[in-house]
Amino acid sequence: MSQRNTGVSTQVVNAHACPVREVLDRVAGKWSVQILVAAAHGPIRFTELERSIEGISRRMLTLTLRNLERDGLVTRTVYPTVPPKVEYELTSVAYELHETLQRLTDWAERNRLHIAEARAAYDAEHRPELLGAQAAR
């Protein structure tokens, strides 16, 4: 069906999809997901997050936390102590998101073998030259 027959232009579709895509890009990011999972059990300090998320740099953790706070998914509480104590906690919206992420994780766990088998079958049928190259390693 052509666009002319649907009455929906590309601009209209992009105008509606862009804000949703922006939110999905933020919450589905590699570091955002790991931060949301790590903070799901209650308030957590920056250094605890840093230790619990393998591979994240201090700068990336700071930027991601700042973005999650800006998006209303994380609250940052600074306690007037020496040295300052800072904790991050999920908001109610982020807890709802965490439930969704947990369901997705459960689905992935239940279906990972099926997906691995489907990939192997597809590769055997469509890419036999790759299987030969992998076997030679």
Image: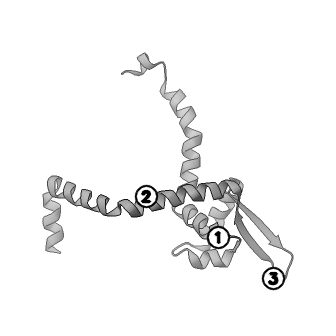
Pick whichever of labels 1 and 3 is earlier in the sequence: 1
Residue ranking furthest to the bottom: 82
C-alpha distance separating marks 2 and 1? 21 Å
Disc 2 or disc 3, which is closer to the eye? 2
* Residue occupied by mark 1: 41
- Amino acid, disc 2: Trp
Residue for point 51% across, 30% down: 13
Pick whichever of labels 2 and 1 is earlier in the sequence: 1
- Left or right: residue 35 versus residue 5 is right
* Residue occupied by mark 3: 83
Q: Where is residue 118 in the image (x, y as percent from the top left)?
A: 25, 56
Rate crowding at label 3 as few (under 14), some (14 to 19) or many (20 or more) other CA atoms within 10 Å. few
- The disc placed on residue 93 is none
Is there any visible trace of residue 73 in the rendered image?
Answer: yes
Quadrant where the C terminus sits is bottom left
Q: Where is residue 42 in the image (x, y as percent from the top left)?
A: 69, 70
Residue ranking furthest to the right: 80
C-alpha distance separating marks 1 and 3? 24 Å
Q: Position of residue 30 (x, y in %)?
A: 51, 62
Rate crowding at label 2 as few (under 14), some (14 to 19) or many (20 or more) other CA atoms within 10 Å. few
Disc 1 or disc 3, which is closer to the eye? 1
Observer-nearest residue: 76 or 105? 105
* Residue occupied by mark 2: 107
Indicate the secondary structure of the residue bearing disc 3.
loop
- Amino acid, disc 1: His
